[in-house]
Amino acid sequence: MRNLRFFIFVIFVFSCFSFLYASEAGQVEFNIRFYDRRIYYAPLDPIFVQITITNNSPAPYRFKLADDRAFSVDFDIRTMTNRPLPSADSLIQKRTVNSQVFFREITIESGESFSFVENLRDFISFTQPGSFRVKAKIYPELFRSSSVQAIESNLLNLNLRPALIPGPDGLPLEMDVATGAVLVKQRLPPDEVVTYMLSARQESQWERFFLYLDLESMLRRDPVQSRRYMAENEAGRRRMVSEYRRDLQNSVIDGDIAVIPTTFDILNTTYNNDEGTVVVLQRFRMPTFTELRRYTYNLEKRDNYWIIVNYHVQGMGTEANN
């Protein structure tokens, strides 16, 4: 019996030891990536980063995650000349005030991951545009001082551009995330406009996705929103369109048009001089099956450019995955 108790004790100590040093052995991965792939601008644009912790060890991995992420996460952002950017004033204030830190313990089972999203501007003060290298740090036992042991992430390259260029109507011009050039509409036929929009969504390029969408018409599809829109002044209407665009991008509303199709096929295109309709079969792959939906996009021709103003969706069943 004594030998059995000693054996159990040894196993317990070994498990604890394995847990404490799993990250040092490279069995716990800590990776970051930009949450939404787009162009970031200097003044106030949020810069969201997705933080993912993956447990590749054979045992569960546990760490503390503070309700206020300032005590669990930090970012080291440097210029190309290796000059570190200063911490945000709000972060410094939180860490210098003597207050209780509330947290929860997270358990990641073997082979599983845990992710959350943070805004870099909550941690770092960006005063000017430029190119930067981004590295994150996570504190499994919470941040108590700068000497606390942390796990470091991979590096990201961040390009922060100057403020948006205002167009003739006073609204900022859209920029291509891939080239950095100003996006300009082309005189495409209706089916190519829809193909352009869907391809942009597949590549998570929001600027291209919105290029041929009439957000005002899309917003006014809802009768309540339409009445509210008509009651606003010009500034209020612009604000509503901006809010609609943000909500659409965050999948808060109109999720049918913002969801990413796995594949799509143009079934039918009809149009005259002023109006057009494009019917598309879109496939959405799930773990065990693929969902089929038929989208009907309504377009209008404005200043010789075809613009998407409305859409309808019809479920078409499912098919088995190959």
Image (tube, rainbow, N blue to C red):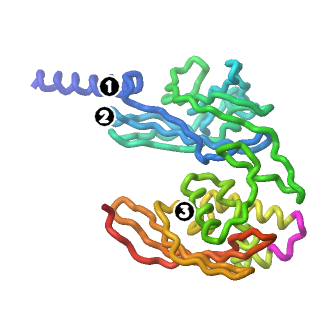
The reply, left or right, for residue 126 in relation to residue 28 is right
Instruction: Report the Cα–Cα distance between label 3 and label 1.
Output: 41 Å
Residue 241 position, x and y percent, is 77, 64
The picture quadrant where one finds residue 228 is bottom right
> What residue appears at the point 89 percent right and 67 percent down from the top-left corner?
234
**Residue at label 3?**
259
Q: What stretch is highlighted in magenta?
A: 229-235
Residue 182 position, x and y percent, is 76, 49
Quick one: 83 or 211, which is closer to the camera?
211
As helix, strand or loop, the secondary structure at mark 1 comes to: helix
**Residue at label 2?**
59
Instruction: Report the Cα–Cα distance between label 1 and label 2.
Output: 8 Å
Disc 3: CA contacts within 10 A as few (<14), some (14-19) or many (>=20): some
The numbered mark at residue 18 is 1
Q: Earlier in the sequence, mark 2 or mark 3?
A: 2
The numbered mark at residue 105 is none
Q: Indicate the amino acid at tag 1.
A: Ser
Quarter of the picture containing the N terminus is: top left
Quarter of the picture containing the C terminus is: bottom left
Quick one: 211 or 86, which is closer to the camera?
211
> What residue appears at the point 70 percent right and 48 percent down from the top-left corner?
176
The picture quadrant where one finds residue 278 is bottom right
**Residue 100, relative to residue 258: is it above or below?**
above
Disc 2: CA contacts within 10 A as few (<14), some (14-19) or many (>=20): some
The reply, left or right, for residue 83 in relation to residue 292 is right
Q: Indicate the amino acid at tag 3.
A: Val
Task: Tell me the mark number nearer the camera, choosing from 2 and 3.
Answer: 3
